[in-house]
Image: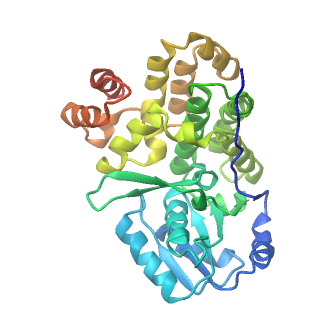
């Protein structure tokens, strides 16, 4: 048997308390002087903590509406920026990726992008970007130029992140690890990293809830999330992810929460055809991985039922029918209903 693994990650990853101090050095390395800062409304009062003076600031809403991204491109272009810095969760990071590509120079190279994440969704680790189209549906794009140049994991900058958002995106990271581990094919490097990421998330997420201001624990969360995503293509295309995206933007459910709702039920469905992988997964989670994930979500006080978001069976039937391709619509609907 022959196989190949292509490692794709940002070139530089800084982590640890006060690592945001490395931002200036990274901008100097990239020869960047005119920065567009892409962030969210909830973080505008924290911008003074970043050692940078942007010449343009772009504020992005949940699920990265493309109308706001287009406006951001116009703002950044008018300011003649030469670098993009994102500060926030997946929506801000994905929007910044698209802006950086749409401002590509004459050689087609995207502007350098430095990401400072404040959630555990790890959008910063993938050469892809999600957005909400003008019809309100979730869409995405892939392009090698979307890859972030530098990531700065500074847990001190995450303390203002609401606890439910922090923990639910931690379950999103768990979703990445599980779906990458259960992906078809041979991926031994990812398997080692995914299992370790799962172990660390099970250990550190409950401590993050118990010790809300512990920067050391939050750093552990960030490292575990990083480890969860060494097979980004397969993870992001996993069944739980795809089913979550199908209902997330349309019904206003955050990405992390869709993982809380769907991951255990998807695991039970997939586990029927890959019992050997589930046994290996149990080494990291304990007996019956799907039950253990469900118990973890419950212990963190996170949502577990789609009905909490006023979504009924009729809407789920539409979602299942639209998504059906690799999996039968009836199977997808059964998973949705199990999560209802």
Q: Could you tell whether 250 is left or right of 57 in the image?
A: left
Percent of width and height locating residue 166: 57, 49
Q: Is residue 55 shown to the viewer in this render?
A: yes
Vertical placement of 92 versus 70: above or below? above
Q: Residue at x 56, y 74 (%)?
A: 104
Quadrant holding the N terminus? top right
Q: Residue at x 72, y 78 (%)?
A: 51
Q: Is residue 43 shown to the viewer in this render?
A: no
Q: Could you tell whether 15 is left or right of 296 in the image?
A: right
Q: Could you tell whether 246 is left or right of 270 in the image?
A: left
Q: Residue at x 44, y 81 (%)?
A: 74
Percent of width and height locating residue 78: 49, 88
Residue 43: quarter of image = bottom right
Vertical placement of 318 versus 81: above or below? above
Q: In the image shown, does 107 or 169 lie closer to the viewer?
A: 107
Quadrant holding the C terminus? top left
Residue farthest to the left, as pictured: 314
Q: In the image shown, does 167 or 10 lie closer to the viewer?
A: 10
Percent of width and height locating residue 271: 51, 16
Vertical placement of 264 versus 58: above or below? above
Residue 275: quarter of image = top right
Residue 311: quarter of image = top left
Q: How many marks?
A: 0
């Amino acid at each position: 048997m022959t196989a190949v693994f292509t490692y794709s990650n940002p070139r530089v990853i800084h982590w640890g308390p006060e690592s945001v101090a490395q931002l200036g050095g990274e901008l100097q390395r990239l020869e960047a002087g005119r920065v567009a800062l892409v962030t969210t409304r909830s973080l505008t009062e924290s911008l003074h903590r970043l050692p940078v003076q942007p010449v343009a600031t772009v504020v992005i809403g949940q699920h990265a509406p493309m109308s706001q991204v287009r406006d951001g491109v116009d703002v950044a272009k008018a300011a003649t920026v030469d670098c993009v810095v994102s500060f926030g969760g997946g929506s801000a990071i994905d929007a910044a990726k698209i802006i950086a590509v749409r401002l590509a120079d004459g050689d087609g190279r995207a502007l350098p992008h430095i990401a400072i994440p404040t959630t555990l969704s790890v959008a910063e680790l993938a050469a892809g970007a999600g957005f909400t189209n003008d019809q309100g549906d979730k869409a995405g794009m892939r392009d090698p130029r979307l890859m972030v140049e530098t990531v700065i994991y500074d847990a001190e900058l995450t303390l203002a992140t609401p606890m439910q958002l922090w923990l639910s995106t931690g379950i999103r990271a768990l979703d990445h690890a599980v779906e990458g581990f259960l992906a078809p094919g041979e991926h031994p490097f990812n398997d080692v990293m995914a299992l370790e990421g799962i172990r660390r998330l099970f250990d550190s997420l409950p401590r993050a809830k118990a010790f809300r201001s512990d920067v050391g624990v939050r750093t552990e969360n960030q490292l575990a999330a990083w480890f969860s995503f060494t097979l980004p293509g397969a993870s992001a295309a996993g069944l739980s992810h795809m089913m979550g995206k199908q209902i997330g933007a349309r019904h206003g459910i955050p990405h992390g929460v869709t993982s809380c709702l769907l991951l255990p039920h998807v695991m039970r469905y997939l586990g029927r055809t890959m019992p050997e992988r589930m046994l290996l997964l149990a080494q990291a989670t304990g007996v019956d991985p799907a039950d253990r994930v469900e118990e973890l979500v419950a212990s963190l006080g996170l949502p577990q039922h789609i009905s909490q978001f006023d979504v009924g069976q009729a809407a789920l039937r539409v979602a299942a029918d639209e998504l059906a391709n690799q999996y039968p619509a009836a199977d997808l609907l059964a998973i949705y209903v199990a999560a209802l």
